[in-house]
Image (tube, rainbow, N blue to C red):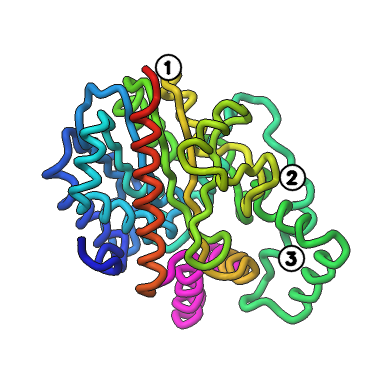
């Protein structure tokens, strides 16, 4: 294999071109699922899918990128490195494990350097039933929404002082919970889960139904960035509240797998988790689900970047220099363009893939 850095692309358009070129010759099936909006460079936007290996196998490992748009700079690099890893592809084949690489779950956010989709929806809060039942409540968010999205950017000293005062009164943990757990009341706000299934989520559900539903055992690695120490990949359990599933994930990926609902993760316990689509789209499969979350910057910088990006969405006529500054801050919050970070990311990704392949191989039919 080459050094790590060449696998990481400078734009969604380039990442898509490179993924397509690398995946098509290896794929048993290749398909694209478009969305209507155009990209930042005027390009078409789509989620591209490559099934590699025996379509009739019993075991499948899914790797997804760009669930949170801009985080695709990292996830796409992991997928490109896997496509270039002949030894790992052969190891999966010998284990009877097919691979399903889903490139750019949220192509709009990837292209436009945003965490959310074209409707400001966080896809990892969007897998809700939306069947008329009440959506998860987050009253804490409503109390700080206007502070998080101020009238001007950069925010005033007074705005920062008010946020600090809220944290001082309620605690940092309560602030993080209110901001990040997901909310369904402020469509222009942070971590908005939407009021209906988003187009990209519907595409992913269709992808799973068409390419994954026939497998008996499914592993899933969803690549994320933005939480935790720089370069460290936290392995976050992404399944339902089922102790047998948690135990299986620990057997695969180690005792250090973090479980949000048990309070052992840098991530808060969320609902509407995208990986939950596996239970709907592949009801006959036994799933083992994990999000691989790479740290980038301190959490306060990441939240600031998200605040700025949402402000820019509400102010598309912002001066060019300010717009570029906000977009760069967003990119820096979710992707480190540095060889040491690239190497750490790909090393941990390769280990996680091998662990999943071995876990699937050992599973009884």
Vertical order, 49 against 171 (above or below): above
Specify few, some or many for label 1: CA neighbours under 10 Å numbering under 14, 14-19, or 20 or more: some
Q: Does residue 321 belong to the magenta stretch? A: yes
Q: Along the line of sight, which residue is nearer the eye, 16 or 132?
A: 16
In front of the other: label 2 or label 1? 1
In front of the other: label 1 or label 3? 1
Q: Along the line of sight, which residue is nearer the eye, 269 or 192?
A: 269
Q: Earlier in the sequence, mark 1 or mark 3?
A: 3
Judging from the image, what secondary structure is the residue with disc 1 in?
loop
159 sits to left or right of 11: right
344 sits to left or right of 256: left
16 sits to left or right of 221: left
Q: Which residue is mark 2?
A: 138
Q: Which mark is residue 284?
A: 1
Q: Which residue is mark 3?
A: 147
Specify few, some or many for label 3: CA neighbours under 10 Å numbering under 14, 14-19, or 20 or more: some
Judging from the image, what secondary structure is the residue with disc 3 in?
helix
Residue drawn at point x = 70 percent, y = 30 percent: 134
Q: In the rendered image, is residue 315 in sight?
A: no
Residue drawn at point x = 48 percent, y = 78 percent: 325
The image quadrant that residue 262 belongs to is: top right
* Residue range highlighted in magenta: 307-336
Q: Along the line of sight, which residue is nearer the eye, 329 or 224?
A: 224
The number of callouts visible is 3
Quarter the C terminus occupies:
top left
Q: Position of residue 224 (x, y in %)?
A: 47, 53
């Amino acid at each position: 294999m080459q050094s790590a850095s060449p696998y990481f692309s400078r734009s969604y358009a380039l990442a898509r071109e490179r993924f397509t070129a690398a995946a098509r010759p290896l794929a048993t099936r290749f398909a694209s699922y478009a969305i209507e909006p155009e990209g930042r460079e005027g390009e078409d936007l789509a989620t591209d899918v490559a099934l590699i290996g025996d379509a009739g196998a019993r075991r499948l490992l899914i790797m997804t990128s760009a669930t949170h748009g801009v985080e695709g700079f990292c996830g796409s690099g992991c997928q490109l490195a896997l496509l270039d890893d002949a030894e790992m592809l052969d190891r999966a084949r010998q284990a009877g494990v097919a691979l399903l690489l889903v490139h750019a779950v949220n192509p709009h956010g990837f292209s436009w350097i945003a965490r959310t989709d074209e409707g400001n929806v966080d896809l990892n809060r969007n897998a809700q039933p939306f069947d008329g039942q009440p959506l998860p409540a987050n009253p804490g968010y409503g109390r700080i929404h206007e502070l998080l999205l101020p009238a001007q950017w950069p925010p005033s000293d007074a705005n920062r002082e008010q946020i600090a005062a809220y944290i001082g009164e309620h605690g940092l943990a309560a602030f993080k919970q209110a901001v990040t757990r997901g909310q369904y009341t402020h469509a222009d706000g942070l971590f908005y889960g939407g009021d209906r299934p988003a187009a990209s989520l519907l595409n992913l559900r269709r992808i799973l139904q068409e390419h994954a539903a026939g497998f008996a055992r499914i592993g899933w690695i969803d690549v994320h960035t933005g939480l935790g120490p720089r370069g460290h990949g936290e392995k976050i359990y992404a399944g339902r509240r089922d102790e047998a599933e948690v135990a299986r994930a620990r057997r695969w990926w180690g005792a250090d797998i973090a479980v949000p609902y048990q309070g052992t993760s840098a991530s808060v316990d969320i609902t509407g988790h995208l990986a939950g689509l596996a239970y709907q789209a592949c009801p006959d499969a036994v799933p083992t689900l994990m999000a691989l979350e790479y740290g980038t910057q301190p959490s306060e910088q990441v939240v600031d970047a998200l605040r700025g990006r949402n402000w820019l969405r509400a102010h598309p006529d912002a001066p060019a220099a300010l717009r570029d500054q906000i977009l760069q801050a967003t990119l820096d919050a979710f992707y480190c363009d540095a060889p040491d970070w690239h190497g750490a990311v790909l090393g941990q990704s390769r280990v996680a893939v091998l662990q999943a392949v071995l876990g699937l191989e050992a599973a009884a039919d």
